[in-house]
């Protein structure tokens, strides 16, 4: 049983030199900067006999301070930081060199693949435009002019209810395959007047047909016979398109050949 404050009177002798270590805060005695010399029990204390008052001497207790066990701070030293930066720089340099080497050694293959993809998309659009060939805004027949490396016709390629004149042909360098689109303008409508507008798009920059003496366009009549007389535009019912593409003919891989075809939906069998 712990005596109450009315039952217990503590007598303290203050020692101003006493220093209490923070780690001893859990010790009740360390909370006071002095020593206990003695305490006096009242007559009502349960620790004394009734009617008796007894003064008890207590032994002086001196608590020795302890030292902190401080843990070292976590982190990198300057040397460790410099080593990490150096290793990181070496790794980045190796990765960058590998990427540069890859593109240098494979640049031609990548360029060839890009050229083939562009040409493939180009001739697919060409075939679609040929299928939709129709009479011009002036009432001209759908096919205007044909040859082995060029084709002129009329088609509403942008679905605006106005028929455009479309030309596919090789540029003067004989390697660039172009698509020329002319919108009619003026009153009456004209494809060659001051109010007409023309745009040119590149289908392929690396065409090899002319160098290999290969036709880009081959024409067939309604019976499937090949047309060799390019003046017979009224007989054209079917068109075969072939593009030969090679970025650099002096290096492998060799020429790449693309083929597609189109039938004229608005073809009318000519009357003899």
Image: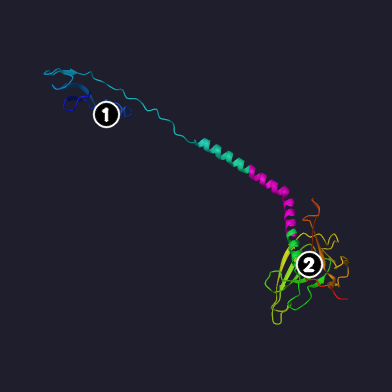
Residue 183 screen position, x and y as percent: 70, 74
Q: Quadrant of residue 29?
A: top left
The magenta-colored residue range is 94-119
Mark drawn on residue 31? 1
Quadrant housing the N terminus:
top left
Give the structural element (helix, strand or loop) at label 1.
Answer: helix
Residue 197 screen position, x and y as percent: 69, 74
Residue 67 screen position, x and y as percent: 36, 26
Q: Residue furthest bottom?
A: 187
Q: Is residue 92 left or right of residue 206?
A: left
Q: CA distance from mark 1 to mark 2?
A: 102 Å
Rendered residue at 27%/26% (across/down):
28
Quadrant housing the C terminus:
bottom right
Total numbered labels: 2
User: 58 or 19, which lies in front?
Assistant: 58
Q: Are marks 1 and 2 in contact (CB under 8 Å)?
A: no
Give the structural element (helix, strand or loop) at label 2.
Answer: strand
Mark drawn on residue 169? 2
Mark drawn on residue 271? none
Res. 154 visible in picture: yes
Asked whether residue 108 is drawn in magenta, I would say yes
Q: Quadrant of residue 14?
A: top left
Q: Main secondary structure of the magenta part?
A: helix
Q: Is residue 2 above or below residue 105?
A: above
Rendered residue at 62%/43% (across/down):
93
Mark positioned earlier in the residue sequence (1 or 2): 1
Q: Is residue 178 above or below residue 140?
A: above
Q: Is residue 83 above or below residue 219?
A: above
Asked whether residue 167 is drawn in magenta, I would say no
Rendered residue at 72%/66% (across/down):
201
Residue 53 screen position, x and y as percent: 13, 19
């Amino acid at each position: 049983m712990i005596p109450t404050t009315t039952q217990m009177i503590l007598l303290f002798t203050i020692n101003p030199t006493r220093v209490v270590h923070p780690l001893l805060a859990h010790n009740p005695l360390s909370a006071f900067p002095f020593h206990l010399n003695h305490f006096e029990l009242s007559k009502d204390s349960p620790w004394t006999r009734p009617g008796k008052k007894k003064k008890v001497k207590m032994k002086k207790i001196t608590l020795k301070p302890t030292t902190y066990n401080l843990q070292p701070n976590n982190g990198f030293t300057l040397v460790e930081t410099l080593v990490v930066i150096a290793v990181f720089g070496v790794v980045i340099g190796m990765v960058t060199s590998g990427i540069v080497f890859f593109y240098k050694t494979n640049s031609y293959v990548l360029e060839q693949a890009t050229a083939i993809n562009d040409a493939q998309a180009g001739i697919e659009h060409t075939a679609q435009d040929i299928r939709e060939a129709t009479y011009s805004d002036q009432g001209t027949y759908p096919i205007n002019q044909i040859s082995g490396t060029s084709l002129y016709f009329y088609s509403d390629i942008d679905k605006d209810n106005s028929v455009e004149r479309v030309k596919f042909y090789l540029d003067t360098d004989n390697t660039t395959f172009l698509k020329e689109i002319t919108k009619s303008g003026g009153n009456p409508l004209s494809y060659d007047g001051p109010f007409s507008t023309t745009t040119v798009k590149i289908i392929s920059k690396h065409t090899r047909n002319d160098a290999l003496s290969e036709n880009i366009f081959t024409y067939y009549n309604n019976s499937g016979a090949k047309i060799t007389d390019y003046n017979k535009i009224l007989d054209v019912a079917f068109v075969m398109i072939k593009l030969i593409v090679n970025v650099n003919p002096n290096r492998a891989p060799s020429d790449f050949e693309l083929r597609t075809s189109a039938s004229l939906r608005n073809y009318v069998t000519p009357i003899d």
